[in-house]
Image (cartoon, coloured by chain):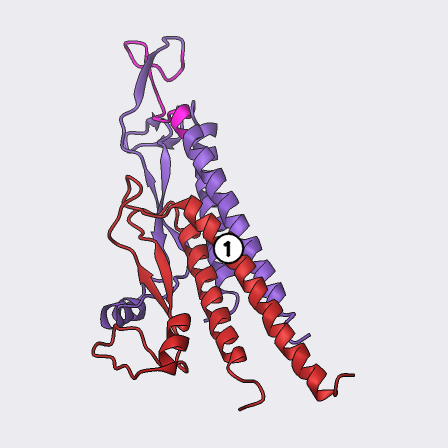
Chain colours: A purple, B red
């Protein structure tokens, strides 16, 4: 166990929240993108909303075995982004016959991004990021104080 | 009686506890958005040890019982799996974690202050009051 374990843990939290923020930014930036990917028929498909999936770090075999035998778990090693998944919600249809990607009936498929949802998610990511910064500063102050022992 | 007495040992154990507690809080905060993550907490039996070591003998009948000897590490991390605070199975209460963080920081600083006080009084004795 390194003395910087707590700082590394908070650091992993910062990385994960920033990646979450990047994903949200990408979703907001592509809220109107109708030509994101090309499907097998050679047609453009709108942008699909992306989400980050968080998992706890340090679920290694030894830590699980230790918990099972002694009932005591380790302090943990932070958080990791285990996956970035795409939202399977169907695309919305908007009537806009002048749009170059409109179908025969004049409807355009637009991305399944809900800006409201993204804003709420963004607030959550910001607050979690701030909490991690506070925890990191606390660990730093404690380590600096530890260096004063015996001075 | 030894030169350092029991104070330094007690302070060291307490510092160890505060350090593990800090790591645990940092981990809880890092995992505040992790689905199904359960908050961890730290158990400490130093005060109990000090009282127990004066009087009677104790024995452990299960490996999961807290150790009563003062030499071994008296800190234990446990996971609270009994509650759910968030709809995604997570039970980290950020407000509680942040207050615990502030408390733990002051506690740690106080311990370092005390251990320094102990060393400086020892030094004062060694120098014969000069």
Location of residue A97 (image quadrant): top left
Magenta span: chief secondary structure: loop
Tag 1, which chain? B
Task: Identify the residue shown where x is 28% and y is 49%.
Answer: B36
Residue A11 visible? The answer is no
Task: Identify the residue shown where x is 33% and y is 41%.
Answer: A85
Per the image, the residue denoted by label 1 is B103
Pinpoint residue A142: horizontal percent, then vertical percent: 57, 62
Outermost residue toward the right in this view: B130
Pinpoint residue A44: horizontal percent, then vertical percent: 35, 27
Above or below residue A59? Residue B126 is: below
Residue nearer the viewer, B80 or A54: B80
Pinpoint residue B14: horizontal percent, then vertical percent: 48, 70
Outermost residue toward the bottom in this view: B1
Decide whether residue A106 is among the magenta residues.
yes
Task: Identify the residue shown where x is 32% and y is 62%.
Answer: B78
Residue nearer the viewer, B25 or A52: B25
Pinpoint residue B20: horizontal percent, then vertical percent: 44, 65
| Callout 1 secondary element | helix
Above or below residue A27? Residue B119 is: below
Location of residue B112 (image quadrant): bottom right
Neighbours of disc 1 within 10 Å: few (<14), some (14-19), many (20+): few
Outermost residue toward the front in this view: B55
Q: Which residues are magenta?
A: A99-118
């Amino acid at each position: 166990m390194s003395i910087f374990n707590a700082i590394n843990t908070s650091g992993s939290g910062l990385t994960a929240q920033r990646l979450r923020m990047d994903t949200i930014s990408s979703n907001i930036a592509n809220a109107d993108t109708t030509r994101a990917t090309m499907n097998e028929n050679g047609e453009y498909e709108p942008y699909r909303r992306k989400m980050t999936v968080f998992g706890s770090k340090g679920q290694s075999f030894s830590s699980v075995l230790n918990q099972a035998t002694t009932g005591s778990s380790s302090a943990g090693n932070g958080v990791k982004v285990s996956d970035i998944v795409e939202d399977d919600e169907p695309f919305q249809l908007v009537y806009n016959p002048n749009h170059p990607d409109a179908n025969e009936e004049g409807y355009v498929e637009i991305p399944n991004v809900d800006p409201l949802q993204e804003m709420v998610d963004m607030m959550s990511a910001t607050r979690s990021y701030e909490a991690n910064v506070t925890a990191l500063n606390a660990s730093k102050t404690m380590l600096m104080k530890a260096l004063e022992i015996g001075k | 009686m030894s030169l350092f007495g029991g104070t330094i040992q007690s302070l060291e154990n307490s510092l160890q506890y505060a350090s593990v507690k800090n790591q645990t809080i940092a981990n809880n905060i890092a995992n505040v958005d992790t689905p199904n993550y359960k908050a961890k907490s730290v158990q400490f039996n130093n005060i109990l040890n000090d009282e127990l070591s004066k009087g009677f003998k104790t024995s452990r009948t299960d490996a999961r019982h807290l150790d009563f000897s003062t030499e071994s590490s008296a800190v234990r991390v446990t996971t609270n799996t009994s509650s759910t605070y968030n709809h995604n199975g997570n039970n980290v209460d950020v407000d509680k974690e942040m207050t615990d963080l502030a408390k733990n920081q002051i506690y740690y600083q106080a311990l370092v202050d005390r251990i320094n006080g102990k060393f400086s009084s020892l030094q004062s004795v060694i120098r014969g009051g000069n």
